[in-house]
Image (spheres, grey):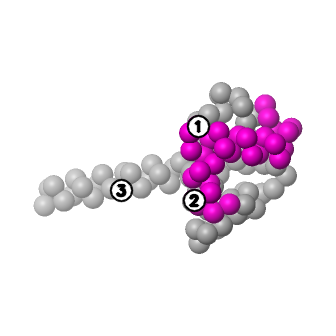
Amino acid sequence: MKKLLMILASVALVVSVAQADVKSGQKAYLKTLKSYFSMNGTKFAAEHSVAEWEALFADGAKGFIKEYGERFPNAQAQLNNPANAAKLQDIGDFAKEYGNDSGNVPSCG
């Protein structure tokens, strides 16, 4: 019984940490990139499917930086700033959670 409780507690912790990354990513998108991309978080996340977001954010978000840097040249400095690397991974978690085929809709503007 004790072992089962430990397993359930571990699963709950993992889920809460993953959810925290999604929330952090939502906040990071709104604070860091929304003004450059001129779209709210809902429109941003719906630009790609979950699999497409996974590919864009793989390998240190190189695909994301390339695609969105070309589309939004005014965001180049933000996208390429090493200090934003952790934020970009959180933004990736947010985008994957709410991709256009995920069935989830964020509550953000």
Q: What's the residue at 81%, 42% (across, down)?
A: 70
Q: Is residue 66 magenta?
A: yes
Q: Are marks 3 and 1 in contact (CB under 8 Å)?
A: no
- Kindly identify the residue that appears in the image at 65 percent across and 27 percent down: 82
The residue that mark 2 highlights is 51
Q: Nearer the viewer, residue 40 or 45?
A: 45
Left or right of 92: which side holds 35? right
Residue 99, given in percent of the width and then of the height, sits at: 63, 62
Check disc 1 and report the residue beneath it: 60
Q: Please rate how many residues cluster around mark 3, counting C-alpha atoms within 10 Å: few if below 14, some from 14 to 19, many from 20.
A: few
For the magenta stretch, what is the residue range?
48-77
Residue at 66% x, 33% y: name it: 84
Amino acid tagged 2: Ala
| Quarter where residue 89 is shown | top right
Q: Amino acid at mark 1?
A: Gly
Mark 3: which secondary structure? Answer: helix
Q: Earlier in the sequence, mark 3 or mark 2?
A: 3
Sequence-earlier tag: 2 or 1: 2
SS category of the residue bearing label 2: helix
Nearer to us in this view, 46 or 58: 58
* Residue on which the image places disc 3: 12
Where, quadrant-wise, is the C terminus in this rendering?
A: bottom right
Residue positioned most to the top: 82
